[in-house]
């Protein structure tokens, strides 16, 4: 087999025959030796029975009947277990994903490891969604940014090399499996192909609050895999040490050396910022100490000064305009400034 496409189903009798026929027409028209694997979660509307009838027409059509509604992600994994191809595909049964994109996506193999049907790259589009649905999708993708640079991590339309999944324990919950594949697989060469996603016309959407909850649980479980999150906590820890060092120098220079406290504060800031820069360079962002040391040092100081300005501005705003107690205001300002400082340095000073 060249390609195995898995389609999870639950109550899709209005769409299932059309999508199966369309895929096999695409296979035949493009000389793709492919198979379609339907994984049905005991649909009450007879979806599984329709597929059984179609098996007599299409020899490369398979169906797995599961005892109940066990979830889309697990359905994909069950389908992959019986797939015969090196290239494993996934798509929805509701005709939202354009089957005509299958040849283009498949054409990027074997050079690609993972090909994604993306709604959020140039020429990609979503038709039929309201503003709320689009906003929820964008927010879900934003939450995945610490783990991957892929623009559409929430799509259910992609193809992946089986060899990239060997030895990887995939165990996603909910209705989105791509992010799990992106984080845990060995896929290095990733291609996003623009698609026009059309909201389902027939049948009922499977999205629910439970699926959103599962997605959030998955994100928490992915934290150990995120280099950016590890870098953030390292950066915060070094920042805490720098703050202690700054306060110590301020106190020591002012009380024991008799230096004017403003001058002491400047000295403390410079020493603490230098301390933070060196440790972040070699520990947080794992760079060689000599690599553009002075240029990046200047960049780090500029970002630190900007962050200081943000801190003071927020402290003033929260205290004077929102009437928040100044210590609480400072705590909130420090937290916000920490993010500004980290992302400013990650994007500019220590960008790769």
Image: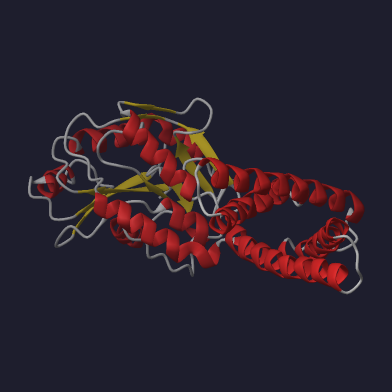
For residue 27, above or below residue 350? above
Give coordinates of residue 170: x percent, y percent.
41, 64
- Between residue 36 and residue 137, name the one nearer to us: 137
Let me know if residue 26 appears in the view: no
Give coordinates of residue 12: x percent, y percent.
17, 41
Give coordinates of residue 130: x percent, y percent.
31, 28
Name the image quarter holding residue 31: top left
Give the total of numbered labels.
Answer: 0
Give coordinates of residue 32: x percent, y percent.
41, 39
- The answer to whether 73 appears left or right of 333 in the picture is left
Name the image quarter holding residue 313: top right
- The answer to whether 177 appears left or right of 308 in the picture is left
- Between residue 155 and residue 88, name the one nearer to us: 155
Let me know if residue 215 appears in the view: yes
- The answer to whether 65 appears left or right of 235 in the picture is left
- Between residue 129 and residue 48, name the one nearer to us: 129
Rendered residue at 56%/43% (across/down): 320
For residue 128, above or below residue 332? above
Rendered residue at 14%/62% (across/down): 67
Coloring basis for residues: secondary structure
- The answer to whether 314 appears left or right of 11 in the picture is right
């Amino acid at each position: 087999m060249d390609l195995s496409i898995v389609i999870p189903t639950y109550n899709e009798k209005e769409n299932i025959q059309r999508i199966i026929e369309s895929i096999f027409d695409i296979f035949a028209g493009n000389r793709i030796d492919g198979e379609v694997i339907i994984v049905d979660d005991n649909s009450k509307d007879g979806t599984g029975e329709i597929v059984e009838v179609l098996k007599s027409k299409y020899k490369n059509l398979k169906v797995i009947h599961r005892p109940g509604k066990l979830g889309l992600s697990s359905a994909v994994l069950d389908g992959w277990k019986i797939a015969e191809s090196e290239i494993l595909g996934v798509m929805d049964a509701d005709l939202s994903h354009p089957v005509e994109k299958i040849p283009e996506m498949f054409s990027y193999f074997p050079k690609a490891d993972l090909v994604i049907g993306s709604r959020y790259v140039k020429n990609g589009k979503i038709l039929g969604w309201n503003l709320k649905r689009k906003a929820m999708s964008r927010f879900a993708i934003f939450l995945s940014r610490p783990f991957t640079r892929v623009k559409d991590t929430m799509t259910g339309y992609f193809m992946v090399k089986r060899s990239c999944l060997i030895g990887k324990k995939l165990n996603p919950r909910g209705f989105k499996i791509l992010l799990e594949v992106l984080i845990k697989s060995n896929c290095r060469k990733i291609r996003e192909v623009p698609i026009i996603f059309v909201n389902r016309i027939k049948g009922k959407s499977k999205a629910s609050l439970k699926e959103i909850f599962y997605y959030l649980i998955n994100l928490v479980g992915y934290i150990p895999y995120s280099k950016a999150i590890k870098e953030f906590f390292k950066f915060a820890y070094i920042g805490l040490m720098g703050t202690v060092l700054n306060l110590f120098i301020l106190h020591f220079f002012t009380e024991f050396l008799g230096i004017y406290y403003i001058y002491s504060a400047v000295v403390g800031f410079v020493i603490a910022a230098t301390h933070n820069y060196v440790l972040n360079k070699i520990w947080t962002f794992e760079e060689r100490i000599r690599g553009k040391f002075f240029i990046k040092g200047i960049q780090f100081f500029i970002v630190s000064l900007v962050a200081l300005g943000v801190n003071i501005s927020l402290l003033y705003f929260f205290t004077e305009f929102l009437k928040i107690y100044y210590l609480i205001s400072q705590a909130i300002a420090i937290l916000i400034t920490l993010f500004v400082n980290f992302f400013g340095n990650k994007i500019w000073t220590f960008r790769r």
